[in-house]
Image (cartoon, rainbow, N blue to C red):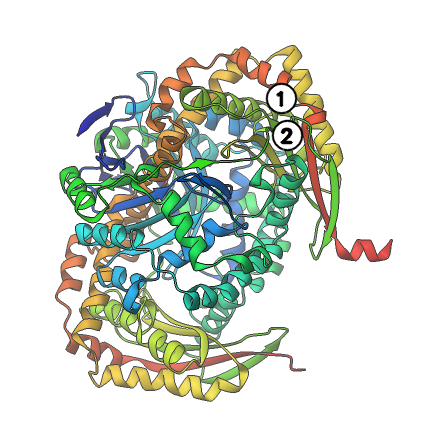
Amino acid sequence: MITTTQLAPGVVLTHCPDRRFKKCALSIQLLRPMCYEEAALNALLPSVLLRGSRLHPDLRTITWRLDELYGASVHTMVRRVGNVQTVGLYLSLMEDRFALEPEGVLAPAVEFLGELLFDPLTENGVFDGAVVDSEKKNLISAIESELNDKRAYTAARMIRQMCQGDPYAVPRLGRVEDVAAITPEALYAHYRRILRESRAEITYVGAGSPERVAELLLPFAGALGGGELYAPDQYPLKPVAQPGEFSETMDVNQAKLTMGFTTEVDQRHPDYAAMQVFNDLFGAGMTSKLFVNVREKLGLCYYAGSAYYGSKGMLTVSSGIDECNYEKTRDEILRQLRLCAEGQITEGELSASKQSIVSALRSIPDSPGSVEGYYAADRILGVSLMLEDYISAVETVTAEAVARCAGTLKLHTVYFLKGEGK
Amino acid sequence: MKHTFYPRLDEQVRRHRLSNGLEVCVVKKPGFARKCAYFVTDFGSVHTSFTLDGKTVTTPAGVAHYLEHKMFDMPDGRDITEEFAALGANVNAFTTYDMTAYYFSCTERFQESLELLLEFVSTPYFTEESVDKERPIIAQEILMYDDSPESRLFEEMNRMLYRHHPLREPISGTVESIEEITPELLYECYRAFYRPGNMMLCVAGDVDENEVLAVAERMLPRESGAPVQVHLGPEEEMAPVENLRRFFMDVAMPGFQLGIKCPAGRTGEDFAHWELVAELACEALMGESSGLYLRLYEEGLIDSAFGWGVETITGSAMVVVGGDSYQAEQVRDAILEEAARLARTGISREEFTRMKRSFLGRRVKDLDSFESTCYRLCAYHFEGFDYLRFPEQFDSVRVEELQEFLRDYILADRCAMAIVEPRQGKEEE
């Protein structure tokens, strides 16, 4: 059974017991408000922490230590969960029972994780300047590479426009100019402050007992301030930007049409499961209405799909088209939505979508990483939706509920990215 | 069925060879919802020349990959992908230099999906029209690979390393070679390589192994078919055809692919042991925690794209090293020098133990992935080794073997290096 234990005020361990795996997972995330002031600092911090601790001061000694721990891996975590940006580290380990010596891997690995988090390499009381510079470069190139993937770029650009004034408009990794302005002093001060002030969510998936894991994590509880102060509220999008259409030009061969909708059905709404089914049936599934009609039947686009953002009550539709098909594609997408709202949903479509979602949900418990992802997000969003309850909610969704969900969607923003012309 | 328990990996496997020669293997994963099945033939792009029923056939490059594409065609226009989707399963396939795999994963309705997998892979249906229709699609795929510097580098390297071995040709063939592919040729290859005795069915998940056997017995041919004899050309000399070649493409940064030719021909236990020794030796030489890696990285001679591997494709063996660098030749020379130095001074026992632990742990962790477990069980089965015996393999490796490997195989006269440089730079010259 999944249990949660408060290790200190504002420091909570979610323990997901599972003895089936060869590996276990441990994540620790500090919760920060998603905002322009902090986004770049939060995104940079974990990468700097992974560059060296006082006892393992460079990449080579860190790699040696991870090798000794049976090829353990530690990754940075910078996630967006609704209005929260998380900062942390993710540890993936071989289970103790496969180790050659009785003390196993978990205990020394948790100790090493603590060292990376709480005892970083410093120079004159702040992070090493060369390390900060090199990680700033990496982060900037990660942000800039978003522009290379035009499909991801247009979706993010549309969301930034539609969500103006809302935390969701803030880019997950911050802005290039904010990263460029970070000094080792500012980053270190930020680090000390967020350790002290942030709510911390720790998630463990593996064979270790809750008592043993909690005991190994006790030093963490002491090092964290455990503030409830900065656990931001989660709320759906209430757009302040004016609804409308806007376009941009770039050197692209394929134009992109992206549409943003709002809905009152968010993750806490009784129709949440029905909205997931609608999204699959409308645009996210393998044989969705958009795929079958807009792409296959009418041949209006190279791709067309939808994405539902349950934490914010938003749905987006993205498509890659020939510029001249702009109006036709937009109108056909809206027509398909209207048909759904009018209840034109076949039994076959409904059951295929439900089956595909249920199958994806049933697969979640089959990997430590997806269990961690599900329950950590669930805690941070404050939803408390156990997987079994979610699955039975999806199984009982009716065509009427799907149509009702389609009816709640209001078109807010249309973004059109077109080529520079010949 | 034969039961095997692997106490050091906590895995239960059931195996059985059907009377038609098909090897069936079920990895028991109690309590898991996901299930996956791999149906694999020991037939890849290098199997271009073979003798069946006394008749020798030589095929154009790319025929295995072409056949994989056409396997999804069924009589009366059935759409296999859609039928899997209707069952809630995802189906896919891939072709490598030495095998072709068809696989699906699902949570529900496993038996029906398994029946469908075995049905479509045992139903060859090729017509003049459907084979012609596929040609431009595969040609597009080939052109896409031609645009990729990584695959161009790898292919150039193979052509420099090997005089005769069919590794000289790309997996999907060339736009010209696929012109020669006909339905008759596909049927001929199908008869030679898609017979049960040349294949393996590997399943992972919480499934009843007897059910798997029953489905396999019901869906597949009774007869094993005549065995095929594969020809890989004359034995290769250890010296490459050519040691260094440069070409130009629209790339931002120069890249390289270095191949170091090693003697091939091992099977079973010997094969797996040699491969493990090779991997550990390369890790000591140029792994991310090695002195050489750190030095090259700090000097800016390599970046995070640097990587290496040990490739053991039917009838060949090589160490491959690739990455981005403005000084690829210096990187090669540094690797050769360091190999010679380590062969002389030795690798410390401490470092050896650390590397072994890391390798062992990563392989154990990988067993959580059903796909990679099935893939490896099949690939090693065709080499005559039970992959899940890797912990015992680790026990048997001695540190001296790593040194011997570096001394005997990492040699300048076994190297072939392909370098790609930005086209822009060439024009300026």
| Count of marks, rendered view | 2
Question: In the rendered structure, which amino acid carries the disc numbered 1?
Answer: Tyr
Q: Quickly name the residue at label 2.
A: B260
* Quadrant in the picture for the N terminus of chain B: top left
Secondary structure under the numbered disc 2 in the rendered image:
strand
* Sequence-wise first label, 1 or 2: 2
Question: Label 2 lies in what chain?
Answer: B
Secondary structure under the numbered disc 1 in the rendered image:
helix
- Is the C-beta separation of discs 1 and 2 under 8 Å? yes
Name which residue lies at 24% across and 68% down.
A277
Q: Quickly name the residue at label 1.
A: B409
Q: In this orientation, which residue lies closer to the viewer: A230 or B267?
A: B267
- Give percent across and percent down for residue B319: 58, 30
In the image: residue A314, left or right of residue A66: left
> For the residues tagged 1 and 2, is the chain the same?
yes
Residue at the outermost right position? B429
- Give percent across and percent down for residue B392: 36, 18
Height in image: A34 above or below B282? below
- Give percent across and percent down for residue A118: 46, 34
Question: In the rendered structure, which amino acid carries the disc numbered 2?
Answer: Ile
